[in-house]
Image (cartoon, grey):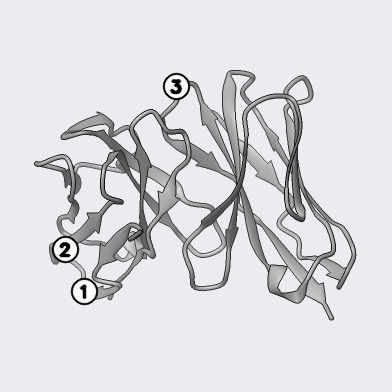
Amino acid sequence: GAGVSQTPSNKVTEKGKYVELRCDPISGHTALYWYRQSLGQGPEFLIYFQGTGAADDSGLPNDRFFAVRPEGSVSTLKIQRTERGDSAVYLCASTPGGGREQFFGPGTRLTVL
Amino acid sequence: QKEVEQNSGPLSVPEGAIASLNCTYSDRGSQSFFWYRQYSGKSPELIMSIYSNGDKEDGRFTAQLNKASQYVSLLIRDSQPSDSATYLCAVRYGGSQGNLIFGKGTKLSVKP
C-alpha cells in the first residue's frame, strides 16, 4: 500500500519568510510524528499527534514552529520568520493505532537562504 | 537528558563478513528499541525492532538487547555492498507511541 508522503520534496525560501510543510500519513495510522534531521545527525523529535490533538510538542524549538492535524489525517508543519538555522530535512512518520513502529516519509528538504 | 550513543564510524567490512553495530542508551526506563537504515539522501527505513532482552533474528539481521547493560546491537551477516548505509539506533522512553530518540548513526561501508 501507499506509504507516508510529504510535500514538497524540496523547499527553498528566504530568511524571514513563512513556510508550510505537508505530511500525508499511511491510511488509518492514528499517530503522526514530525522530526527534523540536520546533516550528520540523527532525526530530532519535534511534535507528535494522536488523532487531531498534539500529544507531545516538547520538541518544537520555539514559537515560530507550529503544527496542525485538523482532521486526524494530513498534518501541516508551519514555520514563521524562517532562519538559516531552520535548514534541515523535515521528516514525518506515522504509526497505526496500538502500533509501536514508526514508518517515515521521504522528507522535505528545507533550505533557508 | 536522555541520550543514545553510537560510534559514528565509518565501519568498513569486506563483502561476506559480519558487520556489528552498537548502541548504548542512558535511561533505564527505555522500553522499545529500533534500528533504521538510511541511504544517503533518503529517509530512514525500519529494519528491526526489539522489545525484550535477548536476540531477534530476521533474515541476515540480528538485533540483540541487554537492558541491564543498556546496550543494543545489530549484526548483519553475509554483508553485501548494498548494505552500505548509515544505521540509526532509536529508543523510545516509555509509552507505546511516544517519540523516538535517535543516535547520530554509524556509517557502514561494505567493500566488494
The type of residue carrying mark 3 is: Gly
Instruction: Answer with left or right where residue A8 lies relative to residue B72.
Output: left
Q: Quadrant of residue B49?
A: top right
The type of residue carrying mark 1 is: Thr
Report how far apart the C-alphas of labels 1 and 2 lie in the structure: 8 Å
* Chain letter belonging to callout 1: A
Q: Are marks 1 and 3 in contact (CB under 8 Å)?
A: no
Q: Which of the two labelled residues, at mark 1 and mark 2, occupies the earlier sequence position?
A: 1
Query: Residue B48: x percent and y percent?
Result: 63, 46
Q: Residue furthest left?
A: A70
- Residue to which mark 1 is pinned: A13
Report how far apart the C-alphas of labels 3 and 2 lie in the structure: 32 Å
The structure residue drawn at horizontal position 28% and vertical position 34%, both measured from the top left corner, is A57
Q: Are marks 3 and 2 in contact (CB under 8 Å)?
A: no
Disc 2 crowd rating (10 Å Cα; few below 14, some 14-19, many 20+) is some
The structure residue drawn at horizontal position 73% and vertical position 53%, both measured from the top left corner, is B59
Return the residue nearer the eye: A96 or B44: A96
Q: Are marks 1 and 2 in contact (CB under 8 Å)?
A: yes
The type of residue carrying mark 2 is: Val
Query: Residue B98: x percent and y percent?
Result: 41, 30
Figure check: B111 above or below B49: below
- Residue to which mark 2 is pinned: A19
- Residue to which mark 3 is pinned: B95
Instruction: Answer with left or right where residue B45 lies relative to residue A86.
Output: right
